[in-house]
Image (cartoon, rainbow, N blue to C red):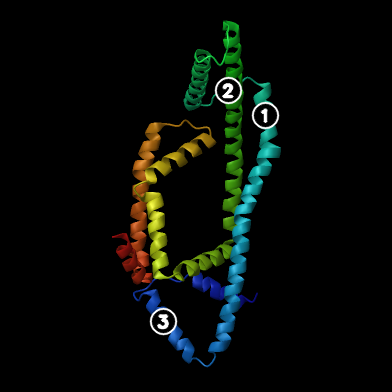
Amino acid sequence: MKYWNLKKINQSALDKTGIIPRSISRLFEKFTKELDPNAEVEALEEFKVSRYQTVASVKYILFLFIMPVLVNQLAKSFIFGPCINYLWNHEEHNIFLNESQEERAFAELQRFEEKLHFEILIGRIQNPSSNFINHKMTDKALEIATQYANESSSAIKNILADFLSGTIFISILIISRRQFSILKSFINELIYGLSDTAKAFLIILFTDIFVGFHSPHGWEVIIEIILRHFGLPESRDFIFVFISTFPVVLDTIFKYWIFRYLNKISPSSVATYHNMNE
């Protein structure tokens, strides 16, 4: 691809907002281009730039996400996995990494004991002896211990593998700045090319998901999954503080973006958003 294509792409990626809304400026530019005798040649060049931009962006997105995931899985399976399993099996370690795991394990064992007694009371287990009950409880305790020992070792693997994949991801962003600029331009053109109704719909959708009335429940589930993924204690105080502050900060940033940028770029989208949100 010729250098003039890359220059046009980079120029599109670095467009800044001005006093005049972008929709009005683009309408004026379109009118002047139609009067230009070289409009057909420029239209062909713009089509080539757009096609190159789309293909390059799709390839970059695939590479940007597939490479860290691939490194994560390979490192976890062939590097960190065998090392952690060897150390975990040959040295004495605690089964639990935190109190949250202990609480979940004890609750699971208690539910099993209650279920066992319930089956005895309704007659599903005939003539149970104390040895039988102790044997069942011991087997269940060993099963739970194995389960949470594997969960603890997996958490350590996740920390190491995710750190490595995160380093790879950041390195790709730093090294491939030109591709990132092309991707940024592609995303800008894709978003700002939508209709006002589509923009307003997406704005309402994302705000309701991340900062809406039901968003705290979703954030609570996400934080619990992340903490469990890294073997961190599932502190209810931390989770409640997070879901009471982070969505507020996110909502403030989003409203500032609407006021600072979207209101200048596409004021009709903001008006449509307010009408749909009422």
Q: Nearer the viewer, mark 2 or mark 1?
A: 2
Counting from the top left corner in percent of width and height, residue 230 is at 53, 36
Residue furthest to the left:
278
Identify residue for label 2.
144
Q: Amino acid at mark 3?
A: Leu
Q: Amino acid at mark 2?
A: Ile
Identify residue for label 1.
85
Counting from the top left corner in percent of width and height, residue 251 is at 35, 52
Residue at image x 41%, y 55%? 206
Above or below for 183 versus 156: below
Above or below for 119 versus 217: above
Residue at image x 37%, y 71%? 266
- Which secondary structure, mark 2? helix
Name the N-terminal-most of marks 2 and 3: 3
Identify residue for label 3.
27
The quadrant of the image that shows the N terminus is bottom right
Q: In screen coordinates, is 86 left or right of 255?
A: right
Above or below for 221 versus 270: above
Counting from the top left corner in percent of width and height, residue 256 is at 34, 59
> Which is nearer the eye, 110 or 54?
110
Q: In screen coordinates, is 212 left or right of 189?
A: left
Counting from the top left corner in percent of width and height, residue 166 is at 57, 47
Badge 1: how crowded within 10 Å, few (<14), some, or many (20+)?
Answer: some
Residue at image x 37%, y 66%? 262
Q: Amino acid at mark 1?
A: Asn
Mark 3 → mark 1, Cα distance in angstroms: 63 Å
Residue at image x 54%, y 90%? 38
- Which secondary structure, mark 3? helix
The quadrant of the image that shows the C terminus is bottom left
Disc 2 vs disc 3: Cβ atoms closer than 8 Å? no
Residue furthest to the front:
123
